[in-house]
Amino acid sequence: MSRAQDLRQTIEDEIVEGRLALGSRLDEVQLAARFGVSRTPIREALLQLAVSGLVETKPRRGTIVSAPEPHHLIAMFETMAEIEAACGRLAARRLMPEDRAALEAALDACAAASDDCETYYAENYVFHGAIYRASHNRFLADQALSLHRRLAPYRRLQLRVRQRLPQSLAEHRGIVEAIMAGDDATAAERLRGHILVQGDRFADLVAGLRPQDAA
């Protein structure tokens, strides 16, 4: 991981955890002094955060902590749901022995981490990556990984909602069951539902992005 990526992760964590509130100004000079680096990796980290909508640059205000509009978040999750559904459908059709082993190992790792949100999130990334690779469609897998990374802060927030970890793990088991059985329609349906945010799940996600004094 590059220094800029490491800084991006640290600042992202502080935003997601509420230590940097919405509307906070992120001054490059102050951040560089705080982390003991030049302004270049700070600038790169802020650019990476801007891609996911966690920060934005405003005239006369500089870079501030922000959050994407709800309709934009919905659009991103809808797109991710359809891409993952396609990966699951192809994986169910094209599963190879090595894919089966990778999925089983990833599922076991998620189960072992199901009492810790951050560890589970890391294993969740591996789990979904195993599905992408099992699709045996390199272009589709690359698109899935790209959007997965872009939505990473919000997927992490989802996992912090009460009872979401055991629910997510149960969904993982259902997805693997369908893929292993070669049931492409069910695999696609379960992955789509696993990713899509609507109703209470979306309300919880948006609530996590609101300033503490507005929640």
Image (cartoon, rainbow, N blue to C red):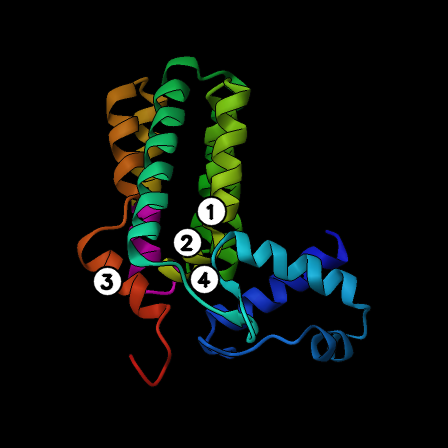
Q: Overall secondary structure of the magenta stretch?
A: helix
Residue 209 magenta:
no
Name the amino acid type tagged 1. Answer: Asn
Q: Is residue 154 above or below residue 207?
A: above
Q: Earlier in the sequence, mark 2 or mark 1?
A: 1
The crowd level at tag 1 (other Cα within 10 Å; few <14, some 14-19, many 20+) is: many
Q: Quadrant of the C terminus?
A: bottom left
**Front disc: 4 or 2:** 2
What is the CA distance from the residue labelled 3 to the residue labelled 2?
Answer: 14 Å
Which quadrant would residue 4 be assigned to in this image? bottom right
Indicate which label's residue lies in the foreground, 4 or 3: 3
Amino acid found under the numbered disc labelled 4? Cys
The amino acid pointed to by label 3 is Ala
Query: Dot 2 surroundings within 10 Å: few (below 14), some, or many (20 or more)?
Result: some
Residue position marked by numbered label 3 in the rendering: 203
Which residue occupies the foreground of this view, 80 or 110?
A: 80
- Residue under numbered circle 2: 155
* Residue tagged 4: 117
Point out the frontmost of discs 1 and 3: 3
Per the image, the residue denoted by label 1 is: 124
Disc 2 element: helix
Residues at discs 2 and 1 in contact (Cβ within 8 Å)? yes
Residue 138: image location, x then y, percent: 55, 21
Callout 3–callout 2 Cβ contact below 8 Å: no
Q: Is residue 121 visible?
A: yes
Task: Please determine whether, in this image, residue 107 is positioned above or below residue 201.
Answer: above
Residue 109 in view = no
Q: In the rendering, at what x and y percent does residue 132 appear?
A: 48, 29
Q: Secondary structure at mark 3?
A: helix
- State the separation of the CA atoms marked 4 and 2: 11 Å
Q: Measure the C-alpha gap from mark 1 to mark 3.
A: 22 Å
* Disc 4 + disc 2, Cβ < 8 Å: no
